[in-house]
Image (cartoon, rainbow, N blue to C red):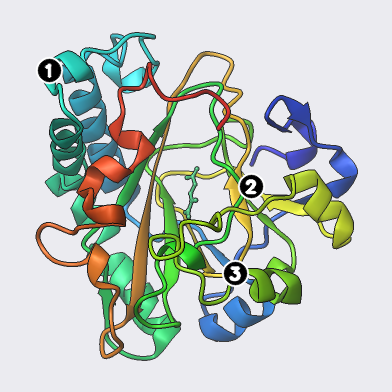
């Protein structure tokens, strides 16, 4: 495993001091997953999926990115070409959304992210049958990009409060290749709850869904740390709606794209946020998959956002 202290991790090009970095702990599958989630705010699970199936899903996605000219040959190396034909092939926002929906609904990808292995884990976590959003947040993050720090609650809180996020790397993600971080202990931070609980970004547009402080400010204010790790095909990270998270800059030395997908699970009997279910999920503002920055051509997405 790639030790956390051997890597230079940054957010918006600002190096993160090693004194506030920590390695995530792997969850213990022989003990209560829900107790561990309540305690730690996250569950790091290794080798949940079949790595061969993850690699088939990876190839499926890379072929679709290559179809719009975004990946260099050999495709399997996942290196961004620096250009894109996505907009000329799919000119409108609606077309771009449809293209991304078709990539996000690839059968090999769905066999992993909605397949029996993760469903078993979710049933173990909830202690009951589980259901998932049909909408999936697939991301192709080229070198130089990062995901901003946030919690998930304001973006998807119209159903049950037992919703969890499952972040799955679709291929290897070294620690310096835009790995996900969570802020240690943040699931218990009263201030974050007071600020965001009940806030719905699609209903109240006057208030942002994201956290105003910088990640470093929030870590310092709360005497916290960034927890992260490197991921292998098959691993996933589960966390709740109030765990503060984001990604480090993808500092891949050779320009490797970071592929990952976030999915959302809940107990089957609980109400589901209708924006993200069904055959044609309306998602945010009724935009479907075109609400995602991942639906934009890779050469148009801002770096380090
Ligand atoms: O993959 C990322 O960069 C961000 C993921 C995320 O924000 C999420 O899982 O909610």
Q: Residue 239 placed where, x, y %? A: 53, 67
Q: Nearer the viewer, residue 249 or 152?
A: 152
Q: Residue 177 placed where, x, y %? A: 56, 30
In contact (CB < 8 Å): disc 3 and disc 1: no
Crowding around mark 2 (Cα neighbors within 10 Å: few <14, some 14 to 19, many 20+) is many
In contact (CB < 8 Å): disc 2 and disc 1: no
Q: Residue at 56% x, 22% y: name it.
A: 144
Q: Residue 292 placed where, x, y %? A: 34, 42
**Residue beneath disc 1:** 89
Can residue 40 be seen in this snapshot? no
**Residue 229, label in figure:** 2
Q: Is mark 3 within 8 Å of ligand 1?
A: no
Q: Please tell me whether residue 95 is drawn above or below residue 282 in the rendered image.
A: above
Q: Residue 151 placed where, x, y %? A: 56, 61
Rendered-image quadrant of the N terminus? top right
**CA gap, disc 2 to disc 1?**
37 Å
Left or right side of 118 for 94: left
| Sequence-first tag of 3 and 1 | 1
Crowding around mark 1 (Cα neighbors within 10 Å: few <14, some 14 to 19, many 20+) is few
Q: Nearer the viewer, mark 2 or mark 1?
A: 1
**Residue beneath disc 3:** 196
Q: Secondary structure at mark 3?
A: helix
């Amino acid at each position: 495993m790639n030790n956390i202290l051997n890597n230079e991790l940054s957010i918006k090009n600002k190096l993160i001091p090693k004194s506030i970095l920590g390695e995530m702990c792997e969850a213990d599958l022989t003990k209560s997953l829900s107790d561990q989630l309540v305690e730690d705010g996250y569950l790091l699970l290794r080798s949940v999926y079949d790595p061969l199936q993850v690699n088939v899903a990876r190839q499926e996605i890379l072929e679709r990115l290559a179809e719009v000219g975004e990946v260099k040959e050999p495709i399997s190396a996942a290196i961004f070409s620096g250009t894109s034909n996505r907009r000329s092939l799919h000119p409108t926002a609606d077309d771009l959304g449809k293209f991304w929906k078709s990539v996000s609904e690839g059968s090999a990808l769905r066999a992993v992210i909605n397949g029996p292995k993760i469903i078993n884990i979710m049933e173990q976590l909830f202690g009951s049958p589980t259901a998932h959003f049909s909408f999936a947040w697939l991301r192709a993050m080229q070198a130089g990009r990062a995901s901003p720090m946030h919690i998930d609650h304001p973006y998807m809180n119209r159903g049950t409060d037992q919703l969890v996020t499952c972040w799955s790397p679709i291929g290897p993600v070294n620690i310096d290749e835009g790995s996900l971080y969570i802020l240690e202990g943040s699931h218990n931070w009263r201030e974050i709850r007071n600020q965001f609980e009940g806030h719905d970004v699609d209903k109240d547009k006057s208030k942002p869904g994201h956290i105003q402080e910088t990640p470093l400010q929030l870590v310092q204010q709360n005497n916290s740390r960034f927890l992260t790790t490197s991921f292998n095909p098959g691993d996933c990270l589960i966390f709740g709606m109030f765990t503060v998270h984001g990604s480090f800059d993808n500092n891949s030395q050779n320009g490797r794209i970071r592929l990952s997908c976030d999915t959302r699970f809940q107990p089957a009997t609980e109400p589901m946020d209708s924006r993200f279910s069904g055959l044609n999920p309306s998602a945010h503002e009724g935009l479907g998959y075109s609400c995602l920055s991942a639906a934009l051509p890779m050469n148009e997405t801002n770096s380090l956002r």
